[in-house]
Amino acid sequence: MRNIVIKNKKIGGVEVSNKIVSSECENTPKDNFYFINCSEMEKELCNMEMRSIFGIEPKEKYLFSEKNFDPSRSPFIKLKISSIYIEEKLEHIINKIKENKISYDDFKVNYIKSENGDVSYEERLKAIREIGFVVTGFPDIHNPKIELAITKVKDKWIFGELIKNNFKWQKHNDKPYSYSNALGLRMARALVNIAMKDNEEGTLIDPCCGVGTVVIEALDLGIKVKGCEISKQIAYNARENVEFLGYLRDTIVCYDMHKIKDKYDSAIIDIPYGLFSPVTLEEQKAIIHTARNICEKMVIVTFEDMEKFIVEAGFSVIDKCVVPKGNFKRHILVCV
């Protein structure tokens, strides 16, 4: 058993005092509780993104962290509960809500199902009803301004404010130009988070940007990004995609990456592999060597294990994973 301290903070205009709770959860309860959702094929990529964002790999489909991260930035975080109370019994949470006079206007209480909660449907309804009754203020189940959440993970009840992934970024799939072998939207968004981590002021380049999938996700996340594409037609299509989604066409240029003089904090490279036009191993190696000159950190996607050539170019590999795609496998390596 470990003792967990929840710090003073204001909830619904009321300052909640320090409290100590015990936990047998594998992850230590912190201020934020994240629910994770990914397919089995995406699991390695999801774990890599979680390691990059939170510094830990989830053992279950959830994790606890002191880090405050917007779920909508990730393709794999379904929601976040900013925890107010963590208790062994629901009654203890209800008593704390009453003691601290937690108050919200236009609120709604949700029960969040957990794989490890073992809570019946009747008990879930009871939890929603009883919490809704003791929170002061006016509920609004149809158009709430604030959503609250109650859940049970293993032997602990967790109550707090609910922030959902809005999934608005999925509209990027509606861009006018794409091709079958381009990076998927979810992978592209995860790669941006892996590449940039907490460096919101950093610069990013995709020097082989194709139709701009990575560039669009970076723009949506507020990253200072540049895309280069050597093919005039594909660069045109990428610029059309960027403009269609409300961003500046000039974010993407038709340019040979080997002529780039600027230096960027990070690069994301989905290395060309010759499905549509011949690409030799020497050309692939040249891309990796040029990347060493234009970025401090590289996240590279390959269809073969190219770690040997990445190290020969002067990079150190600090993380890696494999993501299946049909009969192929994508190797993703994080390099500095």
Image (cartoon, helix red, strand yellow):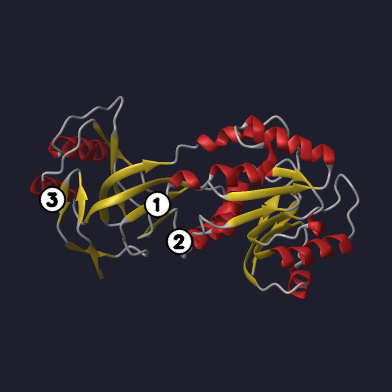
- Residue 175: image location, x then y, percent: 66, 32
Q: Nearer the viewer, residue 119 or 302?
A: 302
Image quadrant containing the N terminus: bottom left
- Residue 53: image location, x then y, percent: 48, 59
Furthest residue to the front? Answer: 261
Is residue 33 something one can see in this rendering?
yes
Front label number (1 vs 2): 2
Q: Amino acid at mark 1?
A: Tyr
In the displayed structure, would residue 43 be above or below residue 246? below
| Disc 1 residue crowd, few under 14, some 14–19, many 20+, Cα 10 Å | many
Q: Quadrant of residue 107?
A: top left
Q: Nearer the viewer, residue 64 or 249?
A: 249
- Residue on which disc 2 sits: 54
Q: Earlier in the sequence, mark 1 or mark 3?
A: 1
Q: Residue at x 50, y 58 (%)?
A: 50
Q: What secondary structure is found at the residue carrying circle 2?
A: helix
Q: Are marks 1 and 2 in contact (CB under 8 Å)?
A: yes
Q: Residue at x 53, y 46 (%)?
A: 222
Numbered label attached to residue 158: none
Q: Earlier in the sequence, mark 1 or mark 2?
A: 1
